[in-house]
Image (cartoon, helix red, strand yellow):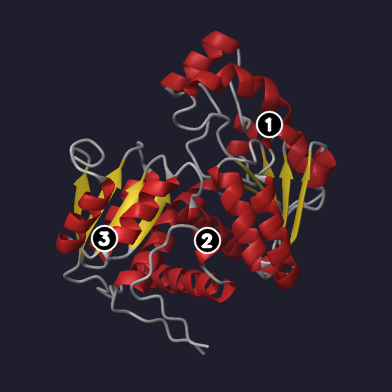
């Protein structure tokens, strides 16, 4: 069956079928290969895209902007609007929908990006909310496919740390959709929402995926990929002491890498990572708590297992695929 995503928003992977996710990954592979050889499809030529950011960003903003420029689109980076202050989200969405061909939103509430999609009449793309980070998962899966000669449904992926945050949620959803064996190495109080977990386990029955959680490190045995994220998300900076106490046993170390028993295991991280003292936040945490590394050791981060910069680059290629598929004029040949 041919996949057509024209006019669709990309708010969470829950809204997309395995076939549609597969199409986005295939399109990302195709567009990445074209960029490497200097071919421009100009699939967004003449389009106008607006980027809305409540949260700071490096990879997400740069990925959307470079992807737009590569494909011929014009970009407005809007940070000083009246949205939510003097003008409602609904009214803002209706205004932006008259000017633009697509809206990216990166912020706190999932309800905000859903309202933008409901009222704008154009594709809206979730660059991150407190609940979900769907564009990141596409980049993660693209990276896994580039580093393994086996399909996603033969991959074991283990997430280490706070499994009820947007990354834990989204990795579980993506894994359930695409048939991965997904494990979370996490304290029980930080496992994903029970209702979401039940929904994904039911889906896994049809895709062949496996979903399991454990506070015992044995869950990493046989893993193809280990994944972690910062222990404290944006907006939760007052929880550093609590998270350090909870999550220190789940730090990704070289001992954990060895525990997988897989010499080819890869390490993934959505970045930024606190693996040294080269940031002001890292130094502040060291002064307060005596930690020079947090969710991952510097040894692992800089090791042969780490593919975090391949992963970071792939944010751009997969975001480009999402925009092209939903708002562009280029179609991947489907055989």
| Res 154 → quadrant | bottom right
Mark-to-mark CA distance, 2 and 3: 20 Å
Query: Residue at position x 28%, y 59% from top?
Result: 119
Disc 1 versus disc 2: nearer the observer: 2
Disc 3 versus disc 1: nearer the observer: 3
Disc 2 versus disc 3: nearer the observer: 3
Q: Is residue 12 left or right of residue 195?
A: left
Q: Is residue 153 visible?
A: yes
| Res 85 → quadrant | top left
Label 3: which residue?
120
Label 2: which residue?
13
Mark-to-mark CA distance, 3 and 1: 42 Å
As drawn, the label of residue 49 is: none
Q: Secondary structure at mark 3?
A: helix
Residue 186 image position (x, y, % from top left): 72, 37
The answer to whether marks 3 and 1 mark residues whose Cβ atoms lie closer than 8 Å is no
| Res 257 → quadrant | top right
Query: Residue at position x 28%, y 73% from top?
Result: 40
Disc 3 crowd rating (10 Å Cα; few below 14, some 14-19, many 20+) is: many
Query: How many tags in the picture?
Result: 3
Label 1: which residue?
251
Residue 91 vs 234, above or below: the answer is: below
Frontmost residue, 57 versus 262: 57
Residue 82 image position (x, y, % from top left): 18, 40
Q: Is residue 38 visible?
A: no
Residue 307 image position (x, y, % from top left): 56, 49
Residue 258 vs 134, above or below: the answer is: above
The answer to whether marks 1 and 2 mark residues whose Cβ atoms lie closer than 8 Å is no
Q: Is residue 151 left or right of residue 320?
A: right
């Amino acid at each position: 069956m041919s996949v057509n995503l024209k006019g669709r928003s990309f708010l969470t992977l829950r809204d997309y079928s395995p076939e549609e996710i597969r199409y986005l990954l295939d399109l990302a592979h195709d567009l990445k290969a074209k960029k490497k050889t200097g071919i421009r499809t100009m699939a967004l030529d003449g389009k106008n895209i607006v980027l809305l950011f409540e949260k700071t960003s490096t990879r997400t903003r740069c990925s959307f902007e470079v992807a737009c420029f590569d494909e011929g689109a014009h970009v407005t980076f809007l940070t000083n609007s009246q949205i939510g202050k003097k003008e409602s989200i609904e009214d803002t969405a209706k205004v932006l929908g008259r000017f633009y061909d697509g809206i990216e939103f990166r912020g706190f509430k999932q309800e905000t990006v859903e309202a933008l999609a409901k009222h704008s009449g154009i594709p809206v793309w979730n660059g991150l909310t407190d609940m979900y980070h769907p564009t990141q998962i596409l980049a993660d899966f693209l990276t896994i496919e580039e580093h393994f000669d086996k399909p996603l449904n033969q991959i074991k992926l283990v997430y280490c740390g706070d499994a009820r945050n947007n990354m834990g949620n989204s990795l579980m959803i993506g894994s359930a959709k695409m048939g991965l064996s997904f494990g979370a190495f996490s304290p029980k109080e930080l496992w994903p929402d029970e209702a979401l977990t039940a929904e994904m386990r039911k889906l896994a029955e049809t895709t062949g995926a496996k979903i399991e959680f454990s506070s015992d490190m044995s869950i990493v045995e046989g893993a193809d990929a280990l994944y972690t994220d910062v222990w404290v998300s944006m907006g939760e900076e007052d929880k550093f002491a609590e998270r350090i106490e909870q999550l220190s046993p789940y730090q990704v170390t070289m001992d954990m890498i060895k525990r997988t028993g897989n010499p080819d295991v890869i390490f993934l991280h959505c970045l930024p990572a606190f693996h040294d003292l080269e940031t002001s936040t890292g130094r502040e945490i060291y002064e307060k708590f005596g930690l020079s590394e947090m969710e991952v050791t510097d040894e692992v981060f800089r090791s042969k297992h780490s593919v975090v910069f391949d992963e970071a680059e792939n944010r751009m290629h997969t975001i480009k695929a999402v925009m092209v598929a939903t708002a562009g004029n280029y179609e991947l040949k489907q055989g």
